[in-house]
Amino acid sequence: MPKSANKLDDLLPQRRATPYSSVELGQWLADYRESVGPSAEVCRGLFDDLVRADALDGQSTDHAMELLETLDALSADPITISCALAHVAGSAGHDISAITDELPTAVQRQLADLKTLKHYESGQNLSGTERSAEGLRRLLLALVKDVRVVLIDLSWQLVLMRRARGMGEAAVNLARETMLIHAPLANRLGIWQLKWELEDLSFRYLEPEQYRKIANLVAEHRTEREAFIQRFLARLEGALKEAGIEAEVKGRPKHIYSIWKKMQRKGLDFHQLFDVRAVRVLVNDLPSCYSALGLVHTLWQPIPGEFDDYITTPKGNNYQSLHTAVANSEGKAVEVQIRTQEMHVHAELGVAAHWRYKEGGPNDPAFDNKIAVMRQLLDSADADLDDESLLDSFRSATSEDRVYVLTPQGQVVDLSLGSTVLDFAYQVHTEVGHRCRGAKVNGRIVPLTHQVSNGDRVEILTAKQPNPSRDWLNPKLGYIAGGRARAKVRQWFKRESRDENLHAGRESLEAESRRLSTDLADLGEIIERFHQNSVDDLYVAIGNGELTAGQVLNALARKKAAETEPDVGDLVSRTPQRQKGAKAPSTDDIVIEGVGNLMTTMARCCHPVPGDRVVGYVTQGRGVTIHREDCGQVVHWRAENSPRLLQVNWGEKPATSYGVHILVRAYDRRDLVRDISTVLSTSDTQVTDISSRLDETLDEVAIHLKVRVRDFEQLSELLSRLGSVNNVIEARRLRHAVG
């Protein structure tokens, strides 16, 4: 095995080289019965029945042993252990119904719930998104009924991921599902033991090169780093003992995915990270946490901006700890985590540390909060969430990066990082979101696209009647970041009548078509792309917020651009002028039917872009000029029956930029041009010309822009953002060049 492969494996929990035997599994169950007591007799009895029925082959035994050890580390009870054992035997294809029928009712109930979670084994005829969303629905349903079932499913997913090597594309698909659903759920439930290994294993298959790079960096100076940590620990242990603070001090492993994620989030190089060297201090009580923190800051220099108090302000999954980073005299940084033993158990096991489901167990507010968050995704109001909305809502609910903001009354509201004041309004109450017309943050009026920060005090300004805007559903405009809020807006529009939605959708699409200066011909040919039965259904989907007009027009443009002749053996492609510094385009922009080796250029009079209906005009000495079909010159040439007109099509992969003329009409105000320039500078769009003219009679400004865009999608986004600037009346594409 290559040395690099060993490095990769060294950073993950080590598995046995040889499979477990049935004898070892039986002994493990006997030891479990000895430690737990008579209640575990059901586990040993089930094992004996499975052996007699020959329902545990070598692979099943190995899988079962690994699954049971994982669950035992989570303090699983005998009911859960029995269910997991039966699940492994059933997953191997054995008919064990006669055995499971004799099991206690509690075990049978868990098995029935677990059976519904086998979405990755069910063979359902679903797309990737639908498959993941359906699996998520089942996970959440099981979660709100009995969290133990979810713990089995998460642990089973870990077993599958550990054994994914050599599975090729199947391993990548499994990793994608794990990273999308299982790892975030483990994080939200606070089960660190499962979370980090699920993430690292998934990352290994999804980003193998990045994984290998970081793994090698971690392994490079391991001996030196471990020696440094031992010296650090010895000094810290001595100081704690001298101060009379009873503590357990040890090095803390840093995981590959968390390193990569921090590098991406903070834009840092590996050697700039403070927590590659990490130490954890476990003390007996809360006062000792802060005493130990003071001692650490006395011994070493604290690094500014690297202290977090998650005890006073716990994370969204109720994680509590003190985090700080210090540097020694040589400038080497170390991250130090300080927490109580109880906090540590909760950090590692999450909800598994509570076992609220035990008969007669006391209520646990932290546990109830975790379950309530997930139950919200399945309440009656969200019963019709589409797959994308459900996944978006889940990502938002399980996001590790959270912000905590305050209502005017001082109530804390937990939101995902990047949430806007509109997300806040819908989090407070659906009706507050529907009636939102403005917001104040820390006493200052802000736009609805304003992203909140930790500690902000947010006041929502409401209207008397609910009236959400369809613009809120456009992700390009930045009104809503969370999938849950977006789903609530969609539901509001769905409740509107079909006729109203049809009318609103048609108007929206026609308005966007006029703004982009394109046509709606062949609209019926793309309805299947959006899973609609008719053009009217497409209008309704736009009207109720399921689709945006921009999405439909972009799909139509892509279809037009892809309509090339199948036999391209005699066809030649040429590219229009590209912007300076752009990557050299491919020869797929324009396809000229029946003509070879001709240069093409884009007409300056009408400036076509991919998606426009175009024709070619043979010039004298300049090859073929590409015009829009509705160009005034083309109309003139057609009237004369010019033989110079050629049939042309957009190629399959237009790969350059195209000049477009845009008109922005607005009521004049101070800083208008500045605000428009800000939109242009942040839109990844090259502006090649700009001019303005003031009509003093109307107090209107007409701003003419010439920009270069990649395609309709970029143009649509730019026009939407320009149209949202205060005082702008309209922003639209001009059919012909100005002047």
Image (cartoon, helix red, strand yellow):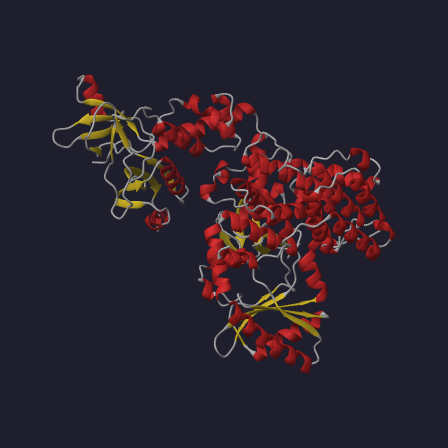
Residue at the extreme left of the image, as rendered: 621
Residue at 75% over, 36% down: 112
* Nearer to us in this view, 694 or 91: 91
Left or right of residue 130, residue 152 in this image:
right
Residue at 57% over, 41% down: 391
Left or right of residue 444, residue 376 in this image:
right
Residue 336 against residue 727 in the figure, above or below: below
Residue 298 found in image quarter: bottom right
Point out residue 310 in the picture as x, y percentages from the top left corner. 62, 63
Q: Note whether residue 305 is visible.
A: yes
Left or right of residue 660, residue 447 in this image:
right
Residue 569 against residue 686 in the figure, above or below: above
Residue at 50% over, 79% down: 329
Point out residue 654 in the picture as x, y percentages from the top left corner. 32, 35
Point out residue 89 in the picture as x, y percentages from the top left corner. 73, 40
Residue 471 against residue 360 in the figure, above or below: above
* Nearer to us in this view, 613 or 46: 46
Point out residue 43 in the picture as x, y percentages from the top left corner. 81, 47
* Nearer to us in this view, 331 or 726: 331
Residue 507 against residue 16 in the figure, above or below: above
* Nearer to us in this view, 440 or 246: 246
